[in-house]
C-alpha cells in the first residue's frame, strides 16, 4: 500500500462532485482553495468518494486504519530541517508558518521523512475505525471495534490548541452528520492498495 503525500484537496473533491452530482461542501472561510485540503465532509461522504475514485481509476483506495495512520504520522515528528518534540501553533505540523484558523495549501516545502505533508494540525482526518477503547497490552496493526456509533479522526485541525495535533491526538464524530460541531475541520487522505 502507499500512503499519499497530501490530504484529498478541494480540487479533487470538486472533480468527484462534478462527475457524480454528489455533495459539494460549502466553500469559504478557513482559507478554502483548490489546492487546500477539503473539509466539511462526513465519513459517509468519504465512502461515496472512495467508491467513485476506485471506479474512475480502476485502483483500490481506502481510508487508513487508525494504526496505519499513526504509523505513517510518526515520521512527521522528524522533519528535514529540525526535530519537533511538540506541536507549535501556527505550523501545521510543518516548518512553514500557518495562519491560525486557515487550512494550508499543499506544497513541496515541508514533508516528513516519508514525504507526507500536513499530518499534524492541518485537518482532522477520518480513518476507517469505529471509536472505542484501546485493548490493553501490545498489539500489531490493531483494527479497532467491529461496530460503534462514532468514527475516529486523527491529526488535529487548524483551529486546535496544542493538545490535539500530535501523533496520539484522537477525536471522534458521527459518520453521517453534516451538522456536527467540528465538521469544518474534518478532511481525509486515502491509502492506495498495490
Image (spheres, rainbow, N blue to C red):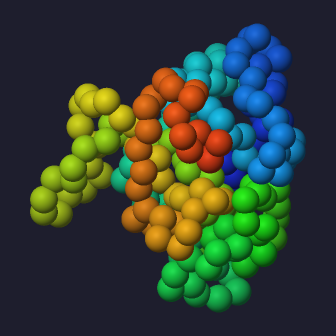
- In this view, which residue lies farthest toward the top? 21
Q: Position of residue 65 (x, y in %)?
A: 40, 44
In the image, residue 152 lies at what x, y percent? 41, 43
Above or below residue 142? Residue 63 is: above
Q: How many marks?
A: 0
Judge whether 21 appears above or below 77 on screen.
above
Question: How far across and down, in percent of the image, does residue 108 sit?
Answer: 82, 65
The residue furthest left is 137
Determine the residue located farthest toward the right in the rendered image.
34
Which corner quadrant holds the C terminus? top right
Looking at the image, residue 131 sits to the left or right of residue 20; the answer is left
Q: Is residue 41 visible?
A: yes
Residue positioned 21% across, 53% down in the render: 134
Residue 110 seen in the figure: no
Question: Where is 53 relative to 61, above or below?
Answer: above
Residue nearest the viewer, comparing 12 with 55: 12
Q: Residue at x 43, y 32 (%)?
A: 174
Position of 162 with respect to 17 (left or right) is left
Residue 112 in the figure: left or right of residue 138: right
**176 shown above or below 84:** above
Q: Which residue is at a point 57% across and 29% down the rendered structure image?
A: 179
Image quadrant where residue 47 sits: top right
Q: Nearer the viewer, residue 191 or 29?
A: 29
| Quarter of the image where one finds residue 150 | top left
Q: Residue at x 76, y 11 (%)?
A: 21
Q: Give the x, y percent position of residue 146.
A: 24, 31
Amino acid at each position: 500500500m502507499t500512503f499519499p503525500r497530501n490530504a484529498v484537496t478541494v480540487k479533487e473533491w470538486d472533480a468527484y462532485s462534478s462527475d457524480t452530482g454528489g455533495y459539494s461542501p460549502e466553500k469559504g472561510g478557513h482559507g478554502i482553495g483548490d489546492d487546500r485540503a477539503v473539509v466539511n465532509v462526513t465519513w459517509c461522504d468519504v465512502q461515496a468518494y472512495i467508491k467513485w475514485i476506485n471506479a474512475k481509476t480502476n485502483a483500490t483506495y481506502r481510508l487508513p486504519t487508525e494504526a496505519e495512520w499513526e504509523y505513517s504520522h510518526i515520521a512527521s515528528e522528524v522533519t528535514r530541517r529540525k526535530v519537533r518534540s511538540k506541536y507549535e501553533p501556527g505550523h501545521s505540523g510543518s516548518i512553514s508558518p500557518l495562519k491560525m484558523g486557515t487550512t494550508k495549501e499543499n506544497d513541496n516545502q515541508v514533508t516528513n521523512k516519508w514525504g507526507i505533508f500536513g499530518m499534524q494540525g492541518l485537518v482532522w482526518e477520518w480513518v476507517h475505525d469505529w471509536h472505542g477503547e484501546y485493548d490493553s497490552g501490545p498489539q500489531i496493526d490493531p483494527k479497532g471495534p467491529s461496530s460503534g456509533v462514532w468514527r475516529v479522526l486523527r491529526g488535529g485541525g487548524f483551529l486546535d490548541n496544542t493538545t490535539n495535533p500530535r501523533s496520539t491526538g484522537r477525536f471522534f464524530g458521527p459518520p453521517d452528520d453534516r451538522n456536527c460541531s467540528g465538521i469544518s475541520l474534518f478532511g481525509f487522505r486515502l491509502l492506495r492498495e498495490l
